[in-house]
């Protein structure tokens, strides 16, 4: 079992579902984003998914795209980001950090170096949503070498055979997108997708994933209400809070964000 899966397994013995919160590194400034991560960890979130911004974040909805563009008004540096996250990982041993970005900035940094430095800074998982597993031979080898988990994504429209393959390859956890499209819209807003023959109910989708996955399951995209998180209990291990948390932070800073987390998870 990988370090990431072992951490999830241990935490799940005392919690029905774990919390993962998404933060854009550098938004609105580097220091404010680090302060926000520290506050989230202090408040007891289990995971922080830190997004290193990229100018064309194709999987993200409007709130996160705007935050990425704002963050990129500064000069951001992957090495500095990794070192700062490493300090947070040391300061808050009860939480874990997963780093998410897109292939372009990490390819420029060097994928093997990325895996090595992340591992050295006690970041246990890496998410690159625009890197298909078939084109990730060197990246996967580097992750294995440095004992860090590449986290793969599946969606409700992933073909069944591909879903089975990705689920069976997952180690740390499998990131299950709860709805097709970009982040940020509520699951309930997807009326237009209900007639799409690919789209199964969330329960059926997660049941199918569980048939193939030995790794823990995280579910994100569109989680905004406590009822949605309660629906995941017993079917997933991690509920991932992204755009809803950013929207709360934009409305009222850290206090508003923490209020949302408490309402959803406590």
Image: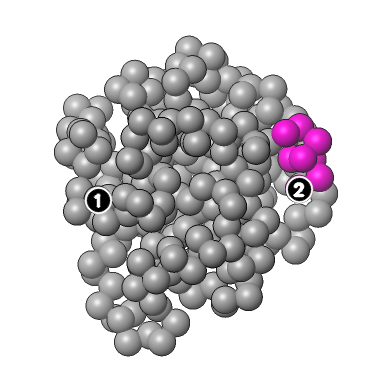
Which color mode does the image show? one colour
Residue 72 position within the rendered picture, expressed as x and y whole percent measured from the top left = 50, 39
Residue 123 colored magenta? no
Q: Can residue 110 be seen in this view?
A: no
Q: Would you place residue 103 above or below residue 106 in this image?
A: below
Residue position marked by numbered label 2 in the rendering: 140
In the rendered image, the residue lying farthest to the top is: 91
Which label lies toward us, 1 or 2? 1
The picture quadrant where one finds residue 81 is top right
Using a 10 Å C-alpha cutoff, classify the residue at mark 1 as few (fewer than 14 neighbours), some (14 to 19) or many (20 or more). Answer: some
Q: Would you place residue 66 above or below residue 118 in this image?
A: below
Residue drawn at (35%, 66%), measured in percent from left and top? 203
- How many discs appear? 2
Magenta region, residue range: 140-147
Residue drawn at (74%, 40%), measured in percent from left and top? 143
Disc number for residue 230: 1
134 or 62, which is in the foreground? 134
Residue 13 position within the rendered picture, expressed as x and y whole percent measured from the top left = 41, 33
Residue 87 position within the rendered picture, expressed as x and y whole percent measured from the top left = 54, 15
């Amino acid at each position: 079992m990988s370090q990431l899966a072992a951490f999830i397994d241990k935490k799940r013995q005392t919690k029905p579902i774990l919390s993962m919160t998404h933060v854009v590194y550098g938004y609105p400034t580097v220091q404010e984003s680090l302060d926000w991560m520290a506050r989230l960890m202090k408040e007891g979130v289990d995971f922080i998914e830190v997004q290193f911004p990229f100018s064309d974040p194709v999987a993200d909805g409007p709130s996160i795209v705007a935050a990425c563009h704002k963050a990129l008004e500064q000069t951001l540096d992957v090495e500095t980001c990794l070192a700062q996250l490493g300090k947070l990982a040391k300061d808050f041993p009860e939480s874990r950090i997963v780093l998410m970005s897109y292939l372009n900035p990490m390819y420029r940094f060097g994928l093997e170096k990325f895996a090595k430095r992340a591992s050295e800074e006690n970041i246990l998982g890496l998410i690159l949503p625009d890197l298909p597993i078939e084109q990730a031979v060197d990246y996967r080898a580097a992750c294995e070498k440095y004992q860090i988990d590449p986290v793969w994504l599946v969606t409700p429209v992933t073909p069944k055979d591909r879903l089975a393959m990705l689920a069976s390859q997952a180690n740390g956890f499998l990131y299950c997108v709860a709805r097709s499209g970009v982040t940020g819209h509520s699951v309930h807003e997807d009326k237009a997708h209900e007639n799409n023959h690919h789209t199964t109910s969330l329960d059926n989708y997660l049941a199918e994933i569980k048939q193939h996955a030995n790794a823990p399951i995280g579910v994100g995209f569109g989680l905004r209400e406590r009822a949605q998180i309660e629906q995941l209990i017993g079917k997933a291990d991690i509920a991932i809070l992204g755009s809803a948390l950013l929207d709360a932070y934009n409305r009222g800073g850290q206090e508003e964000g923490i209020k949302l987390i408490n309402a959803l998870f406590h």
